[in-house]
């Protein structure tokens, strides 16, 4: 609503000038007063205007100071106080005074309603602007929260990937630990076998020493008779053969022991 000059001001009853009223057809006329500043009203004025014309013709006019009332409510545009009082006295005698006063009051109410409507419109505009600003702020907040939520989801996905990788490494570590335990068990078994072979080799060595002693005893009996010598040679051959067999067994045992030792060393070097 666009405010106009004089809007929101309460009109003061100023009466009307006799020269401002011109008779019209069917007894109707135009009111030129402070009320005509807001709107032009047509109203039936047959009886009052007829009496006014009769008094003017009979020379019983009230002496008034004729002034032109300009539009607006400024003090310079109003008639003098004497003219106002004369007009009020004259119009108080007219039956149309109440109707004109009602019109002025209605115009005042219309102007007041317009002013109230303007103020209400401005208040609604302010509320609308505030609501739009609040909505824009809420939109920015929702956008910011959405971005934060997306960042949190991405962060959770990265953390989940990291946890999966760590779990895979832990599972791999468990498998490696199980393999190492199995290898330790195999190494322990090989160590037991190696100890058994070493013990067997020690026994073979003791037996070899015993056989060598027997050979020495046989040599001491060499000076005996031929019978004993033949028997001794036969026994010696048998012992030599046994010795060879034992040496072969010892060599084979040592070879196996070395191979087992190498295998153990290789297994120890495995990470």
Image: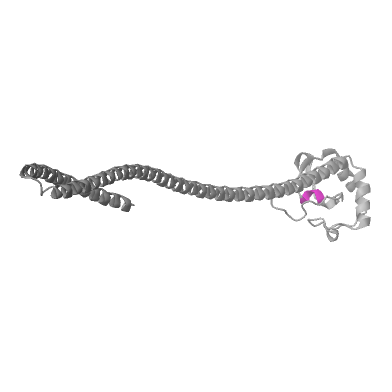
Residue 52, horizontal then vertical, whole percent: 87, 44
- Residue 27 is situated, as x and y percent measured from the top left of the image, at 79, 40
Residue drawn at x 86%, y 41% as measured from the top left: 96
Residue 251 can be seen, yes or no: no
Magenta residues, dominant SS class: helix
Above or below — where is 100 with respect to 262?
above
Residue 186, percent from left and from top: 32, 42
- Identify whether 4 is placed above or below 197: below
Name the one closer to the observer, 180 or 185: 185
The structure residue drawn at horizontal position 16% and vertical position 48%, both measured from the top left corner, is 215
Q: Nearer the viewer, residue 74 or 129?
A: 129
Q: In this picture, which residue range is highlighted in magenta?
A: 33-37
Instruction: Specify whether residue 98 is painted magenta.
Output: no
Q: Is residue 80 left or right of residue 31?
A: right
- Which quadrant of the view contains residue 190? top left
Q: Position of residue 6 (x, y in %)?
A: 78, 54
Say which of 31 and 184 sits in front.
184
Q: Residue at x 93, y 52 (%)?
A: 85
């Amino acid at each position: 609503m666009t405010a106009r000059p004089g809007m929101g001001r309460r009109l003061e009853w100023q009466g009307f000038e006799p020269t401002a009223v011109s008779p019209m057809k069917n007894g109707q006329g135009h009111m030129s007063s402070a009320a005509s500043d807001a709107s032009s009203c047509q109203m039936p004025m047959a009886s009052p205007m007829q009496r006014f014309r009769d008094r003017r013709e009979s020379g019983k006019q009230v002496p008034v100071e004729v002034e032109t009332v300009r539009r607006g409510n400024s003090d310079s545009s109003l008639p003098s106080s004497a003219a106002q009082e004369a007009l009020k006295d004259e119009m108080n005698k007219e039956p149309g005074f109440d109707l004109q006063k009602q019109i002025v009051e209605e115009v005042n109410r219309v102007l007041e309603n317009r002013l109230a409507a303007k103020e209400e419109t401005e208040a609604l505009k302010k509320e609308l602007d505030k609501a739009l600003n609040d909505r824009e702020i809420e939109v920015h907040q929702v956008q910011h929260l959405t971005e934060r939520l997306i960042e949190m989801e991405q962060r959770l996905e990265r953390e989940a990937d990291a946890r999966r990788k760590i779990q895979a490494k832990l599972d791999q570590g468990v498998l490696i630990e199980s393999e190492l335990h199995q290898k330790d068990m195999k190494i322990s078994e090989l160590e037991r076998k190696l100890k058994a072979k070493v013990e067997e080799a020690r026994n073979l060595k003791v037996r070899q020493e015993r056989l060598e002693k027997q050979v020495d005893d046989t040599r001491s009996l060499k000076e005996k008779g031929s019978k004993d010598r033949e028997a001794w040679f036969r026994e010696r051959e048998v012992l030599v053969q046994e010795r060879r067999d034992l040496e072969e067994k010892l060599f084979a045992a040592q070879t196996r022991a070395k191979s087992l030792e190498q295998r153990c060393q290789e297994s120890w070097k495995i990470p």
